[in-house]
Image (cartoon, rainbow, N blue to C red):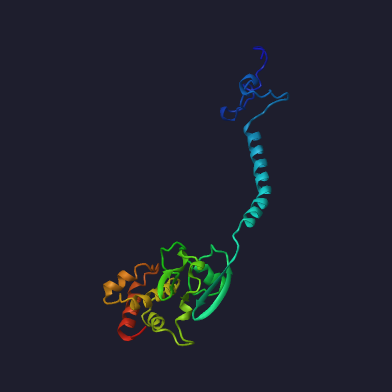
Amino acid sequence: MNPKEPDQYSQAGLPTWEQPVRPEPASVTGTPAPSGPVDPSRRTFVAGSAALGAATLLTRPAAAQASDETAPALVAVTLRVNGVARSLQLDPRTSLLDTLREHLGLTGTKKTCNQGACGACTVHVDGVRINSCLTLAVMHDGQAVTTVEGLSQGDALHPMQAAFIAHDGFQCGYCTSGQIMSGVACIREGHAGSEAEIREWMSGNLCRCGCYNGILAAVKDVKENHAGV
């Protein structure tokens, strides 16, 4: 540039932070210098970013289609749920919790943290209590699953369900089904010999309403007054 010619970059009259970037000479970048006026300002950068974003959005359906094409094949799973054999075709990645709620419509088992931390999704598999969000349905092919819907006999509530009502063991009720399933298991496992033991073996079931005294009273009541639960 001739020192006497006006510098288009220094005389732009813009604040320092908005000054255009001076292009590198071709000898440095290896790229031929543009023949027309260059204005790599913040405005052109924003316009370029918007165009790139639009291009990304246009390519998303193709990416989603590719993902669908790589989804694993469905597998046959048979579960005996609440005494009834249920045959399903499932994505092998489907959790037992989602199988119960989304495929079988048994919404008594609640989906809360979905990380095994709250116990709201507790069910019995072959008589053993588990967090159904942490296990896959295909892992239990051929096994017996009991949910809170399977405890009652028709209109007759299970003693633990009745005890939760009698001792006001719930408020919002979201954790109640998991608490009831754990309460039944706690007694069957022989871990309801004292209040301290019940508290310890029910500690994996959380109640955000703080109904622990009512829950404890319900489990203790069933343990003392209902043999063979």
x 47%, y 74%: residue:
143
x 45%, y 61%: residue:
115
Q: Residue 104, located in which quarter of the rendered image?
A: bottom right
Question: Is 190 situated above or below 115?
Answer: below
Residue 102 at what x, y percent from top left?
56, 70
Question: Is 26 situated above or below 49?
Answer: above
Question: Is 116 situated above or below 124?
Answer: above
Between 62 and 42, the residue placed more toward the observer is 62
Residue 178 at what x, y percent from top left?
42, 72
Residue 141 at what x, y percent from top left?
50, 71
x 53%, y 65%: residue:
94
x 43%, y 63%: residue:
116
- Number of dots carrying numbers: 0
Q: Is residue 91 left or right of residue 174?
A: right
* Quadrant housing the C terminus: bottom left
* Quadrant housing the N terminus: top right
Between 43 and 177, the residue placed more toward the observer is 177
Residue 112 seen from this side? no
Q: Residue 182, located in which quarter of the rendered image?
A: bottom left
Residue 205 at what x, y percent from top left?
38, 69
Question: Is 9 situated above or below 155?
Answer: above
Residue 198 seen from this side? yes
